[in-house]
């Protein structure tokens, strides 16, 4: 069965600093991987996805993630944090079986400080 | 450009009451999903549907029911509300094509408290 582990339920960075949110996955088949962002009192919005091909994936708002098969990782990065990046971030992997279901990690709350 | 619309946004129920959470999408997506989100737990799949008339259980279906009579609508029913069902509920949809590589699109959620 597929699973996702997000290390660090809370991450705090200074404005302008590097953002690194960790995601490791377990999958019995080649995975499709997603990062979503959730702002307060809103639903989840897609940041980026990895399907096949280029392992470095660029998303919205300056975020990117690199798929590393050997490390079963899909960490999310942004070179310079902005106050508006404060939100909760979820990593997800497509599950096997019908319905193309997603298995989500438990989320990482990102705090950006002045 | 509505996307996925959920109603109501907030609701307080008493133990034992029933209610239906509404979800509708205008993107002609065949696949629809219901999740619950609890603090520190991520999102857990309750039920999903791959088209009108077809539904299946997810990871945490107990205490819930769904139906899918049209492509657009996917209501979630709580028959006997329990405090353990206090949560934020999200509906999502996606296109059928592309296998697992297409993203799901989410509504803004329904915040449900059961007292």
Image: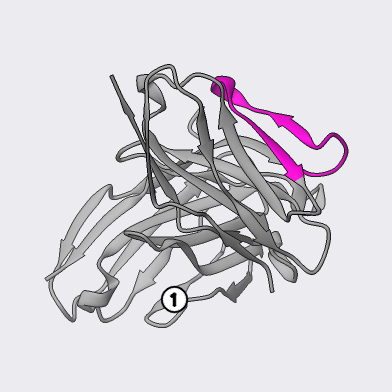
The image quadrant where one finds the C terminus of chain A is top left
Left or right, residue A18 beside residue B16 = right
Magenta residue check for B41 = no
Tell me where residue B95 appears, x and y as whole percent. Answer: 70, 47
Left or right, residue B26 beside residue A8 = right
Asked if residue A8 is positioned above or below residue A85 in the image, the reply reads: below
Tell me where residue A2 appears, x and y as whole percent. Answer: 68, 68
Q: Quadrant of residue B28?
A: top right
Q: Residue at x 48, y 61 (%)?
A: B34
Whether residue A53 is visible? yes
Left or right, residue A43 beside residue B112 = right
Whether residue B72 is visible? no
Over which residues does the magenta segment extend?
A: A50-67
Q: Residue at x 52, y 58 (%)?
A: A105
Q: Nearer the viewer, residue A21 or B60?
A: A21
Q: Nearer the viewer, residue B85 or B43?
A: B43
Q: Nearer the viewer, residue A70 or B4?
A: A70
Magenta residue check for A59 = yes
* Residue at image mark 1: B65
Q: Residue at x 56, y 47 (%)?
A: A22
Tell me how the rendering is colored.
Answer: one colour
The image quadrant where one finds the N terminus of chain A is bottom right
Q: Residue furthest right?
A: A53
């Amino acid at each position: 069965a597929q699973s996702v582990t997000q290390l660090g339920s809370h991450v705090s960075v200074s404005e302008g600093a590097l953002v690194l949110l960790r995601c490791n996955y377990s999958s019995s088949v080649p995975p499709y991987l997603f990062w979503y962002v959730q702002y307060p009192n809103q639903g989840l919005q897609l940041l980026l996805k990895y399907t096949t091909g280029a392992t470095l994936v660029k998303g919205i708002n300056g975020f990117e993630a690199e798929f590393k098969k050997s490390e079963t990782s899909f960490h999310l990065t942004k070179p310079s944090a902005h106050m508006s990046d404060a939100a909760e971030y979820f990593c997800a992997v497509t599950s096997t079986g019908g319905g193309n279901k997603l298995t989500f990690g438990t989320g990482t709350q990102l705090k950006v400080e002045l | 450009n509505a996307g996925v619309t959920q109603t109501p946004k907030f609701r307080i129920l008493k133990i034992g009451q029933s209610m239906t959470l509404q979800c509708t999408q205008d993107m002609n997506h065949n696949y629809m999903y219901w999740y619950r989100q609890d603090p520190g737990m991520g999102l857990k799949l309750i039920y999903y549907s791959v088209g009108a008339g077809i539904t299946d259980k997810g990871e945490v279906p107990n205490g819930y029911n769904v139906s899918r009579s049209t492509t657009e609508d996917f209501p979630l029913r709580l028959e006997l509300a329990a405090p353990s069902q206090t949560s934020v509920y999200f509906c999502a949809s996606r296109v059928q094509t592309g296998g697992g590589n297409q993203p799901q699109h989410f509504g803004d959620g329904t915040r449900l408290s059961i007292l």
